[in-house]
Image (cartoon, grey):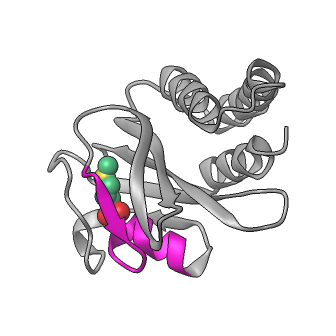
Amino acid sequence: MSADTRKKTYEHLKDEIFSVVSGETYLPARLATTACLLSEAFQPRFFWTGFYVVDPLKPQELVVGPYTGTLGCLRIPFGKGVCGACAETGETQLVADVHAFPGHIACDSRSNSEIVVPVRDGNGNLVAVLDVDSTEYGAFDEIDQEGLEAICQGLLIA
Ligand code: SME
């Protein structure tokens, strides 16, 4: 898929996702819909697509949420691996080779690169992270970062 097509796909997906989840207040329904539509649009590059949610009972821990892909680990402490780094810093993590990332959690050894984007509520509090893994090395770039950040930024508000 060319860079231009990817950009257009993200723009279209953003509209589609916001339109499907509009009016839906149940968070898992919003997240499951988003994971499904993203994964379908970018097969086979998106090998694992889903969310880790901040556990309201353990605010320094992520727990697995809706996802599409092979078995994901259940819990990730803030600061551990790529998802934990995103949760701790609040910054998107774009990782071309996960095996070189300190503390990376290998839920599936076929994953070789990864992007993790924060999801915040209307008050700016971190609610979840979106994790996308690929079997290719260096599968994600700034187009993915921009597209996924735009979707995650509006996801709990749209
Ligand atoms: N690789 C991730 C863990 C989650 S899974 O890949 C589904 C990480 O290090 O954060």
Question: Quarter-wise, where is residue 154 in the image?
Answer: top right
Residue at 44% x, 43% y is 65
The residue nearer to you, when weighing 20 against 147, is: 20
Quarter of the figure with the N terminus = top right
Whether residue 25 appears in this view of the structure is yes
Provide residue 84's location: percent of width, then percent of height.
42, 71
Relative to the observer, which residue lies in front, 107 or 58?
58
* Residue 137 in view (yes/no): no
Q: Is residue 18 above or below residue 57?
A: above
x 48%, y 46%: residue: 51
Quarter placement of the C terminus: top right
Left or right, residue 145 beside residue 108:
right
Part of the protein shown in magenta: 73-88
Asked if residue 82 lies in the magenta stretch, the reply is yes
Residue plotted at (65% across, 47% down): 148
Decide if residue 149 is on the left or right side of residue 65: right
Residue at the limit of the structure toward the front, as seen here: 57
| Residue 103 picture location, percent across and down | 25, 77
Quadrant location, ligand no. 1: bottom left
